[in-house]
Structures are given as structure tokens and as C-alpha cells.
Image (cartoon, rainbow, N blue to C red):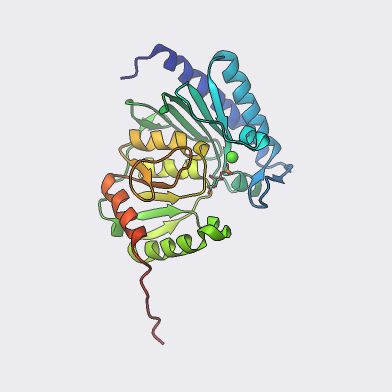
Amino acid sequence: MCEVKDLDECYRAAEELVLYAGKIIKDGIDTRKNVKSKGIDWDLVTEYDRKIEDKLIKQLSGRFPSHKFIAEETAAKEGRLPQLTDDPTWVIDPIDGTTNFVHRFPHTCISLALLVNKKAEIGIIYNPLMGQFFSARRHCGAFLNGKPIKTSDVRDVSQSLVAMEPWIAKDPQYLASVYSRMHALIQGTHGIRSLGTAALTLCYVAMGAVEAYHIESIDAWDVAAGKLIIEEAGGVVIDTAGGELDLMIPRVVAACNQQIAQQLVDLFKKPIQRYLIKT
Ligand code: IPD
Ligand code: CA
């Protein structure tokens, strides 16, 4: 039940701030940006990421002084990932899909979650460029622009559309697993889609636009809000090996239901099947 009064206040503040941050993204999308890489040349940040994150933290800590934060650009600046505790904690990705934002590919969003006792109570993901405002509160359902959403009812992975992000194969430690999982998906599903924003792709699972999503090598801020939105829409988010997701080291299989999630876990465990090219 949504009866915690403080959470109502938190939700109202979060909604207002995310809508405001959306204006910053809209204003910035067509401008020349100051693009920097964060150590690795394909992990980008702009002045807009920092501006939004600073604004959200300043406003939220002003209203809720005891609350904590786990936020992408602050973690990058400090070179450390804060610990997740039971305290109310805002998990912030000021721009998820920064590379999309830089390239003006209009799939980019703000992702904001509030966790209490390590459980997400509020999740908001907003793509201002496409006018998509996804929201959820624990036990209250998931919504797109105020209308309830639910996951797809497909139960056979061979009938599903699955999103994944092959770019993480740039990192040699993921190369073999990415290629073999892509192979498994090409052979075993209706198709693969790749959006370049983990948070929004999780929402696409929630709204039934894809049956599942697989990604690794991401962080809590990419997943915290989307996980709640999917769960409130009837789906599941589990670890790639099966079992519970570790939010602080997320290896994500997100799916419209437990059956599809488990079938993907099993598919990824199978050794790559050799196939013959007939000449
Ligand atoms: C990235 C996006 C992308 C995912 C990356 C993330 P960012 O977040 O979510 O889809 O594949 O791992 O880092 O850098 O745009 O906030
Ligand atoms: Ca980001």
C-alpha cells in the first residue's frame, strides 16, 4: 500500500525535479556540448550530466537532509562507489544514454530512484525528447505518462524480442560472452534490439515493447529505477546466472515474466552451437 506520507512528499519532489531536468536535456540536445571521456574513451560525460546531477542533489538534500545519494557523476569524480545502506538513498543517473545525447539520438533519459532499507520505493525515468515519463511506486503499479503499463505476456523465448548492448565487447573480458550470447539470441529469438540506454530499455520491457533485456558492466544508477518499474509492471529483473540481482554489481536479465527470464539464463549457459555455412 502507498501510505507512507513522507514517500508522497518524496515522490512529488522527485517528479518535479525530473521534469525540470528534462527541460535541461531538451535545451541541450541541439547545442554543441563539452564532451569528455571518463577514463575510458567511450564512457562520455558532458556539462549537462553534471548540471542535472548537481541540481538534483542540491534540491533533494535541501528538502531531505538525512537522505543519502549514489549518483553517477559524483561517484566518478570521487573515484569510489558509495556503499548502499538501509538509509533512504537517492540513486541518480542524470543522463542515461549520454552517448546518445552527444550524438542527438533521441533515446536518453533521467533515472531517479529512492531506496529505503535497500528496497526501491520510487522509480522515475523520463525521456523528455520522446515525451515518455515512466514512474512506479512499490505496490502501486507502473505508469507511462500516468497510464498503467504492463509487460508482455509472451512465455516462450523463441517468440520474443530481446534487447542487449553488444558494445561492452569493447572490453576484452566481455568479448567472448557477448558474442556467444548474441549468437544464442540470433538463433533463438525473434530478434535483437539495442537502444544505448539501460534505464530506458528497462522501461521498454515494462511497457511490453520488448520481452527482455540483457546487460552487464553497468551500475546501480542504470538499474535502480527501471527494476522497480519492471517489477511493478509484472516483470522480473534477475542476475545473469539466475537468482537475485546484486544492485551494486548488476548483471542483468530483465524480462516480462519469470519463464522468459529463466529461459534466457538457460540459453546463455548453453555452449555456443556450431553451425555450418553451406556453400
Ligand atoms: C550507459 C547506458 C548504456 C549502457 C552503459 C551505461 P550512461 O549509461 O546505460 O546503455 O550500456 O553501460 O554506462 O553512461 O549513458 O549514463
Ligand atoms: Ca549517465
- Residue at x-position 46% and y-position 43%: 250
Q: Where on the image, by quarter, is ligand 2?
A: top right
Which x, y percent locates residue 219? 52, 41
Q: Quadrant of the C terminus?
A: bottom left
Q: Quadrant of residue 202?
A: top left
Q: Quadrant of the N terminus?
A: top left
Relative to 245, 16 lies left or right? right
- Residue at x-position 41% and y-position 37%: 227
Vertical position of residue 123 compared to residue 106: above or below: above
Vertical position of residue 93 compared to residue 201: above or below: above
Which x, y percent locates residue 87? 47, 21
Q: Quadrant of residue 97?
A: top right
- Residue at x-position 67% and y-position 37%: 28
Outermost residue toward the bottom in this view: 279
Q: Quadrant of residue 118?
A: top left
Relative to 74, 178 lies left or right? left
**Visible in this render: residue 153?**
no
Q: How many marks?
A: 0
- Residue at x-position 72% and y-position 45%: 36
Relative to 257, 116 lies left or right? right
